[in-house]
Amino acid sequence: MGRGVQVRTRTGGSVIVTEPRLPSAFAEFEKFAEKWCLATEPERWEARLSTPMSEIREFYDAFSPRFEEAIDYCDKFPLEDVPDDALNLLHLIYSMIMVSMAVEIFGTQKPADSADAEMHRVSAPVP
């Protein structure tokens, strides 16, 4: 069994996460990891479309203050040799980018007055 990490919730409580996905310096975001550490852009897009705006806003508000710090952390590694925890943090960064327009511009997870909101890719950039 892996090491446990105590993560504080917004309501002041805490939960124990037994298998941390993120670097220990970013343990406070473990509660978002399962939903937002997604490897592909279509997965992140689908998560944005299917997640209530209140949850998107909670993720955005929590991660925004440390967004640049997370990028700086990931920049320490060459792309061909990113540790799993840093790769998960990178996926969290990508999800933050995906939801930021919903929060900052649209005010809703689904683009209004636009074409069909579907995304189909035949390949994706790595990582």
Image (cartoon, rainbow, N blue to C red):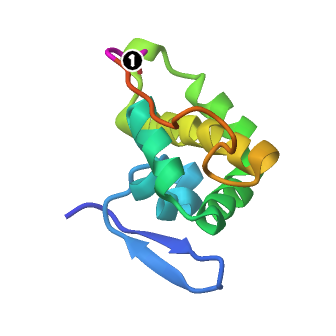
Query: Is residue 12 positioned above or below 94 on the image?
Result: below
Is the C terminus in the top left, top right, bottom left or bottom right quadrant?
top left
* Relative depth, front residue between 110 and 15: 110
Count the labels in the image: 1
Label 1, secondary structure: give it. Answer: loop
Query: Is residue 77 positioned above or below 16 on the image?
Result: above
In which quadrant of the rendered view does residue 68 lie? Answer: top right
Q: Position of residue 124 (x, y in %)?
A: 39, 17
Question: Badge 1, how many Cα within 10 Å: few under 14, some, many 20+?
Answer: few
Q: Which residues are magenta?
A: 122-126
Q: Position of residue 29 (x, y in %)?
A: 56, 58
Mark 1 lies on residue: 124
Q: Is 124 one of the magenta-colored residues?
A: yes
* Relative depth, front residue between 107 and 18: 107
Left or right of 84 in this view: 113: right
Left or right of 94 in this view: 114: right
Q: Is 114 one of the magenta-colored residues?
A: no
Query: Is residue 116 positioned above or below 122 on the image?
Result: below
Left or right of 97 in this view: 86: left
Query: Is residue 26 positioned above or below 119 on the image?
Result: below
Name the residue: 48% across, 14% down: 78
